[in-house]
Image (cartoon, grey):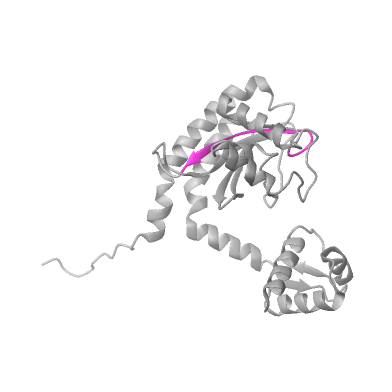
Amino acid sequence: MTVAAVSRCLTLLELLAGEREPVELSDLADRLELPTSAVHRLVTTLVNHGWVTQDAASQKYALSLSMSTLAFRNLDARNVPDVVQSVLNRLAAETQEYCRLAILEGRDLVWVARAQGAVTGLRYDPDMGQEIVLHATANGKAWLATLPEEEALEVVYSRGFGATRKLGPNSARSIDELRTRLDETRKRGFATSVEEAEAGTAAIAVPFRASFDANAPVAGTISVAGPLIRISPDRWPDLARSLNTAAVELSNIWPLRTRQRTMTPLIVATGAVR
């Protein structure tokens, strides 16, 4: 396969990953801006490898569960869920809001764990597959604020202020706006997003490091989010304290991921001791 074919294949998988219902071949071709024949070759190859399924009746295409299985296998290999879930569960129970954790992958943040703490009223329960738009999310700004300003602005400028999904009415639309918000984040000690990532919602977030060493690299971010009416400014200090406590816990246990991946199983001798 050529590099272009690989790129088209990945783009096709990303497109199908965001669809709830199977998609017609012609629709895929239109959205990918490719000839129908080229898209047909791609989906046929993916069907043969088990990554895509075709409905026998409608002839439409959908992503199979192979991608989900691969993702869960990778998370399990990294020991991410076991290490962080107990911390997230405690945070969710304490705040009674929706809590999520994202890990840093190069210059991207990726959701890997969540816990729902809301027990009454409105429940915020977003799709874990959503893109983390760095300039519009509390998690994104929490990480960007740990970088030198020039580097943080370059990361966002290289991507632009758009997104693959609709953002909230308050999302930053210029470098100057973003610079101001990152400066506020550094001074405050936590990041906020008030109708920036999504209308009607708010979130606050903090980063956590790969170990308890203050100079350790940032490993990811942790956040509390919910309806705008509940994640109000008067709650920010209390939520930030809870987040910072959780971040310290994560930094202390994060090195376990490496040790768990490299640990040799203990072999217990069953013979008589001599």
Observer able to see residue 150: yes
Residue at the outermost top position: 234
| Up/down of 202 relative to 154, above or below | above
Q: Main secondary structure of the magenta part?
A: strand
| Picture quadrant where residue 23 is located | bottom right
| Up/down of 236 relative to 166, above or below | above
Observer able to see residue 116: no
Seen at 67% across and 73% down, the residue is 3
Q: Where is residue 58 shown, x and y percent of the image?
A: 88, 72
| Picture quadrant where residue 91 is located | top right
Q: Where is residue 79 shown, x and y percent of the image?
A: 47, 55
Task: Report how many numbered discs are placed on residues in the image.
Answer: 0
Seen at 76% across and 48% down, the residue is 163
Residue at the outermost front position: 150
Left or right for 15, reference 111: right
Q: Nearer the viewer, residue 212 or 97?
A: 212
Seen at 82% across and 73% down, the residue is 55
Seen at 71% across and 42% down, the residue is 125
Q: Where is residue 65 shown, x and y percent of the image?
A: 67, 66
Q: Quadrant of the C terminus?
A: bottom left
> Which residues make up the magenta segment?
197-209
Question: For residue 128: magenta?
Answer: no
